[in-house]
Amino acid sequence: MYRILIADDKEVFRRKLKRLSYFEKASDRFSIVGEAGNGLECLVMLKEDKYDIVITDIRMPIMDGLELLKEAKDNNLCPCVVLLSEYADFEYARKGIVNGAFDYIVKPVTDEKIEEVLNRAYDFLENKEPEEKIKVNELVDMILDRSSDFDAKLLNFAREKLKADQSPKNLWDNCSKILEDTLKMLVGEEKILEEYLKYQRKGFPSSMSSKDVVIYFILHMDELRKTYDLFSFKDKHQLVQKACEYVLSHPDEKINQQEIAELLYTNSSYFSQLFKKEMGIGFNNFVSASKMEYAKRILSGKDVKVAEVATMTGFTDVDYFSKVFRVYTGNTPISFRNGI
């Protein structure tokens, strides 16, 4: 899904643009994730996070759309800038196209106009990234292969495929996109895994060097691979699939082996042996790991109290939850959150 940033000094216009029915129809392609009241504010947002498309008015205070376009192009901040203009600003819009704008739309902006431009922008962005898609496919193949030398292959991938000579910010954006797309491909039909494999894109930490970004990428990709190996069940025995689906769908429940065996109308001893053979881990350990991974995702993405996280993962005693979490991760819940 491509991320859109809107820049216009009129809040009423920004609100109307977001309410266009096209964005609901194309919700699988585009998401408006940010808005700015002038070009300078938009520029700051572009430097802090990755956006695929900027839709910006030409006439704005502090920094206008043409200045914003120049900064975005000179610093490789956004591949697709669409200018908005009044009829009287046509000459400005023409200059924008000459200077690298993807297109321009004359106000008032209608569903038909935005659909025409964004459909072409979608095709442009899809065809722009074949190299990135090749990288994602290679990573997915490495993870699905489940080979014992994954770490060595990942290091080689980082050394050969990540362009560490680019700016740390651009490298960060590229690595984040690769992580997101790899996750999306891995989840596939196992939508339930999304909550357990979720990658939280962060704003770029300005203190990071390109080397730091590569290390960050390797650590996150390795964690993604380990979590996928632990929870993926699509090629397992039908009983094991149903058990995994139930456990991952009910992180707030206390689940034991006897109850799940009864739920599946099978013998507990047989189920225990089958589950360990198929998943490579005992059922009770799988349940515990699923709760801890779920807790990690909550702590990394939301400002939730530890006691609430304990409840959300089926623990009635927050101290016991913290103890189990520390054994599993090596950190207390608070230390884990602060270290993200």
Image (spheres, helix red, strand yellow):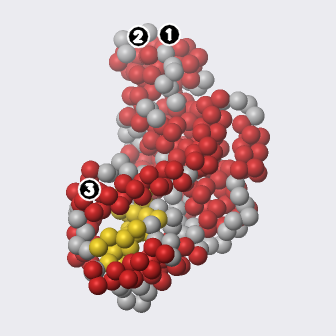
Residue at 43% across, 86% down:
63
Would residue 302 appear left or right of 157 to someone viewing this image? left
Would residue 30 appear left or right of 227 to someone viewing this image? left
Q: Residues within 10 Å of mark 2 (few under 14, many from 20)?
A: few
Q: Position of residue 125 (x, y in %)?
A: 48, 55
Judging from the image, what secondary structure is the residue with disc 3 in? helix
Residue at 56% across, 19% down:
278
| C-alpha gap between disc 2 and disc 3 | 50 Å
Q: What kind of residue is marked 2?
A: Thr
Judging from the image, what secondary structure is the residue with disc 2 in? loop
Q: What kind of residue is marked 3?
A: Tyr
The answer to which of 19 and 244 lies nearer the viewer is 19
| C-alpha gap between disc 2 and disc 1 | 7 Å
Q: Position of residue 204 (x, y in %)?
A: 57, 67
**Tag of residue 22:** 3
**Tag of residue 189:** none
Residue at 44% across, 16% down:
238
Would residue 179 appear left or right of 1 to someone viewing this image? right
Residue at 50% across, 26% down:
233
Q: Position of residue 223 (x, y in %)?
A: 61, 44
| C-alpha gap between disc 1 and disc 3 | 53 Å
Q: Residues within 10 Å of mark 1 (few under 14, many from 20)?
A: few
* Residue 189 visible to an observer of this rendering: yes
Picture quarter containing residue 190? top left
| Rendered-image quadrant of the C terminus | bottom right
Answer whether labels 2 and 3 touch (C-beta < 8 Å). Answer: no
Q: What kind of residue is marked 1?
A: Tyr
Q: Which residue is mark 1?
A: 270
**Tag of residue 266:** 2
From what the image shows, is residue 252 above or below residue 61? above
